[in-house]
Image (cartoon, rainbow, N blue to C red):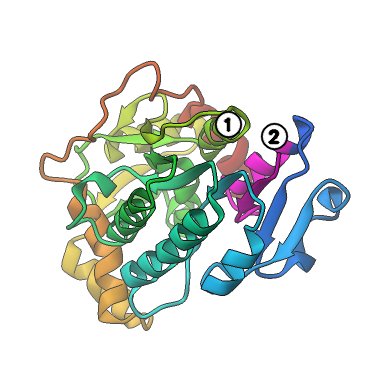
């Protein structure tokens, strides 16, 4: 069985890689530069040079693959939504031409809207492209990653958690490692029908609630502070982002507020165990 994994150094891909190797599988890892792969894995994987933004490279790298984990990486592009859609076209072509028997795609809560969720709209385009192949595809619609908090380290050092979301809107928050466990299990087990599986984490949290959790886990006071949309736009433009890039970021917050409810409810299947308290103590506290 040949299983291919993209972004093997990312928050999700790295854990999938470890799980597959420890399960006795020799995965094929698709990387722009295989030279940066951790030496610990070199004897246990087949590393293939592949730029996911190169359709011919994706096609060549996935020849003979039975199962595929596709995670769309961040691509420097004037229009992030168009970039995700373009990459989605590449993977759909590969899945269709090679007859990949099962594909797991890391999507996001909000993709079910199809329009109006900023950069998430690009993941929605990928879902549509993969569904159009008629092949077995599973879309993992994940909640808000715990690891996104690392992007706000400077503010957290000042005791502030900043967000463009309303502070009282609950969102599903999830540990990337829990997403990886589901992805690896789905890659290893045979199945012939896909669809959507939400990954909601252990509970929904508002940003006010997250600040309270962080206060306890980090041993320092943290308060949530909302950034106005126009202020965020101005700050992003000031660092050189173009209009489409700015709207891709701002649009994600706009798309997940105002009554948005995930398509799949919280159930035993969509709920994962790792808590924000434990993750923050283990991963965030040492960085502060």
The residue lying at 69 percent from left, 43 percent from top is 17
| 244 w.r.t. 124: above or below | below
**Which residue lies under the disc numbered 1?**
181
Mark 2 or mark 1: whose residue is earlier in sequence = 2
Task: Give the CA separation, mark 2 to mark 1.
Answer: 8 Å
Say which element carries label 1. Answer: helix
The span shown in magenta is 1-20
Residue 35 visible in the current orientation:
yes
The residue lying at 27 percent from left, 29 percent from top is 264
| 165 w.r.t. 220: above or below | below
Name the side, left or right, on which 215 lies relative to 278. left
Q: Which residue, as the protein is rendered here, is positioned at the far left?
A: 258
Coordinates of residue 164 in the picture (x, y in percent): 25, 55
**Which residue lies under the disc numbered 2?**
19
**Is disc 1 surrounded by few (<14), some (14 to 19) or many (20+) residues within 10 Å?**
some
Q: Are marks 2 and 1 in contact (CB under 8 Å)?
A: yes
Say which element carries label 2. Answer: helix
The residue lying at 49 percent from left, 42 percent from top is 104
The front one of 57 and 165 is 57
Coordinates of residue 131 in the picture (x, y in percent): 34, 48
Residue 28 counted in the magenta span: no
Name the side, left or right, on which 127 lies relative to 169. right
Indicate the quadrant where residue 141 lies.
top left
């Amino acid at each position: 069985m040949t299983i291919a994994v993209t972004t093997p150094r990312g928050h999700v891909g790295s854990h999938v890689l470890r799980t597959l190797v420890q399960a006795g599988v020799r995965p094929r890892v698709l990387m722009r530069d295989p030279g940066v792969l951790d030496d610990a894995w070199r004897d246990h994987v087949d590393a293939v040079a592949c730029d996911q933004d190169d359709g011919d490279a994706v096609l060549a790298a996935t020849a003979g693959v039975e199962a595929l984990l596709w995670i769309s990486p961040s691509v420097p592009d004037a229009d992030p939504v168009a970039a995700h859609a373009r990459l989605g076209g590449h993977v759909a072509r590969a899945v269709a031409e090679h007859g990949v028997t099962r594909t797991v795609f890391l999507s996001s809560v909000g993709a079910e809207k199809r329009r109006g969720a900023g950069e998430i709209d690009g993941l929605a385009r990928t879902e549509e492209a993969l569904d159009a192949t008629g092949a077995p595809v599973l879309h993992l619609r994940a909640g808000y990653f715990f690891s996104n908090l690392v992007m706000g380290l400077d503010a957290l050092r000042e005791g502030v958690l900043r967000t463009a979301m309303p502070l009282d809107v609950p969102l599903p928050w999830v540990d990337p490692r829990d997403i990886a466990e589901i992805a690896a299990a789905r890659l290893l087990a045979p199945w012939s029908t896909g669809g959507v599986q939400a990954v909601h984490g252990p509970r929904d949290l508002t940003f006010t609630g997250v600040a309270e959790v962080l206060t306890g886990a980090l041993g320092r006071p943290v308060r949530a502070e909302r950034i106005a949309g126009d202020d965020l736009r101005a700050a992003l433009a000031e660092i050189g982002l173009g209009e489409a890039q700015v709207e891709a970021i701002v649009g994600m917050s706009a798309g997940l507020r105002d009554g948005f409810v995930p398509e799949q409810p919280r159930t035993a299947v969509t709920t994962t165990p790792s808590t924000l308290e434990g993750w923050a103590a283990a991963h965030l506290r040492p960085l502060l």
